[in-house]
Image: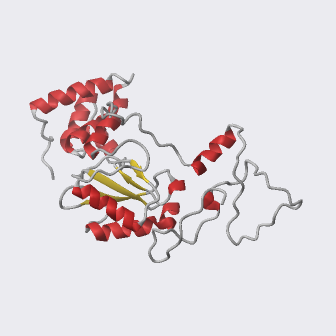
C-alpha cells in the first residue's frame, strides 16, 4: 500500500503549477469544472497522473482525493503509470481492424517487444490499441500523441515507430506538427501552442466523412452511389444516370475490398477513390 498522504511537489514546481492552475480555474463559474484540464496540467509535469498530481488537483479545487481519483481512473487519456514520449495508438475498432488495424497492432507489439499499454525500454514509445480514432475514411489509422497518421500499413507503422525512437522528425498526415506527450498534455490543459505555424496547421475530415454534413446542409452530392462489389445491384430502370438521395450512402466503404494492403496475409491493392 502506498504511503498516505502523497508527497508534495517541490516548492518551485508547486508555485509554477499553482499559477497555471489559477489561470485554468478562472475560466469556469464552478471551480470543480476545471478538474479535467487540471489533470492534463499535472500530466504535463510528469508524463502521467501521479498521486502527487491528484493531491494537487484536490487541494486546488477543494475536492477529496477520492473524487479526483474517480475521474482520473475513468478516462483513458490520463496515464496512471510512467509512459513514453510518444503514445502510439492503433485503432482496432471494426473498420480499422478489418482494413488492417489488427495486423498493424500485432506487428508493432512484436517489433517493439511490448504489450498493450507498455513502454519500450528507451522510454520513447508507449503502444496501445484504441477503440476508435473517429477517422474511418482513412482506415487503418494510427495516432501519435493524438495526431493522425492515416492509411497505414504494417511496414509504414514500423517505420513510424522506428523514426520516433531514433529522434527523426515525422509529420502527421494532417493537423499540427508532432510534439511530445508532455507538451500535448499542456496544450490539452488549455494553454496555447506557441510553436511557429502549429496553430495554423489543420487537417479536416475526409471526403466520405463530410458528405453527410453537406447533405444535411441541403447541398447536392456530386458522387454517385457505389454498390458493394458482386451485389448484383440493378441499373436504373430507365437507363438514366442515378441521382443519389440523402438516404443513400456515398462512402467508398460501401464497396470494401476483401482486406487492406496492411494485412500481409491477404494482400490487396490500394483502395478505390470515392465514386470509382
Q: Position of residue 204 (x, y in %)?
A: 50, 43
Whether 99 is drawn above or below 59: the answer is below
Q: Quadrant of residue 69?
A: top left
Residue at image point 33% right, 62% down: 159
Q: Position of residue 270 (x, y in %)?
A: 53, 65
Say whether residue 61 is visible. Answer: yes
Q: Position of residue 216 (x, y in %)?
A: 68, 40
Residue at image point 47% right, 43% down: 203
Left or right side of 273 for 262: left
Say whether residue 117 is visible. Answer: no
- Relative to the observer, which residue lies in front, 2 or 158? 158
For the view shown, which residue lies furthest in the bottom direction?
Answer: 265
Left or right side of 247 for 46: left
Left or right side of 176 for 41: left
Q: Quadrant of residue 161?
A: bottom left
- Relative to the observer, which residue lies in front, 141 or 45? 141
- Relative to the observer, which residue lies in front, 162 or 227? 162
Query: Which quarter of the rendering shows the C terminus?
Result: bottom right
Q: Quadrant of residue 142?
A: bottom left
Residue at image point 42% right, 43% down: 175
For the view shown, which residue lies furthest in the right direction?
Answer: 238
Whether 144 is drawn above or below 41: the answer is below
Residue at image point 64% right, 64% down: 255
Q: Position of residue 236 (x, y in %)?
A: 84, 60
Amino acid at each position: 500500500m502506498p504511503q498516505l498522504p502523497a508527497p508534495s511537489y517541490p516548492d518551485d514546481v508547486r508555485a509554477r503549477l499553482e499559477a497555471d492552475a489559477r489561470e485554468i480555474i478562472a475560466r469556469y463559474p464552478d471551480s470543480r469544472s476545471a478538474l479535467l484540464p487540471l489533470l492534463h496540467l499535472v500530466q504535463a509535469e510528469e508524463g502521467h497522473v501521479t498521486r502527487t498530481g491528484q493531491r494537487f488537483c484536490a487541494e486546488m479545487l477543494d475536492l477529496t482525493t477520492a473524487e479526483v481519483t474517480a475521474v482520473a481512473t475513468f478516462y483513458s487519456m490520463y496515464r496512471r503509470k510512467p509512459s513514453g514520449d510518444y503514445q502510439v495508438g492503433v485503432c482496432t475498432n471494426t473498420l480499422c481492424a478489418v482494413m488492417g488495424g489488427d495486423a498493424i497492432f500485432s506487428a508493432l507489439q512484436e517489433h517493439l517487444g511490448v504489450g498493450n499499454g507498455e513502454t519500450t525500454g528507451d522510454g520513447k514509445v508507449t503502444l496501445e490499441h484504441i477503440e476508435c480514432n473517429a477517422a474511418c475514411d482513412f482506415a487503418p489509422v494510427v495516432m501519435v500523441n493524438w495526431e493522425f497518421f492515416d492509411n497505414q500499413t504494417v511496414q509504414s507503422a514500423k517505420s513510424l515507430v522506428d523514426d520516433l525512437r531514433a529522434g527523426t522528425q515525422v509529420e502527421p498526415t494532417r493537423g499540427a506538427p508532432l510534439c511530445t506527450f508532455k507538451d500535448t498534455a499542456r496544450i490539452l490543459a488549455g494553454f496555447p501552442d506557441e510553436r511557429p505555424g502549429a496553430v495554423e496547421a489543420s487537417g479536416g475530415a475526409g471526403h466520405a466523412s463530410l458528405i453527410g454534413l453537406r447533405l444535411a446542409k441541403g447541398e447536392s452530392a456530386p458522387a454517385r452511389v457505389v454498390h458493394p462489389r458482386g451485389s448484383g445491384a440493378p441499373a436504373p430502370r430507365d437507363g438514366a444516370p442515378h441521382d443519389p438521395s440523402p438516404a443513400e450512402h456515398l462512402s467508398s466503404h460501401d464497396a470494401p475490398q476483401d482486406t487492406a494492403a496492411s494485412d500481409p496475409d491477404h494482400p490487396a491493392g490500394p483502395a478505390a477513390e470515392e465514386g470509382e
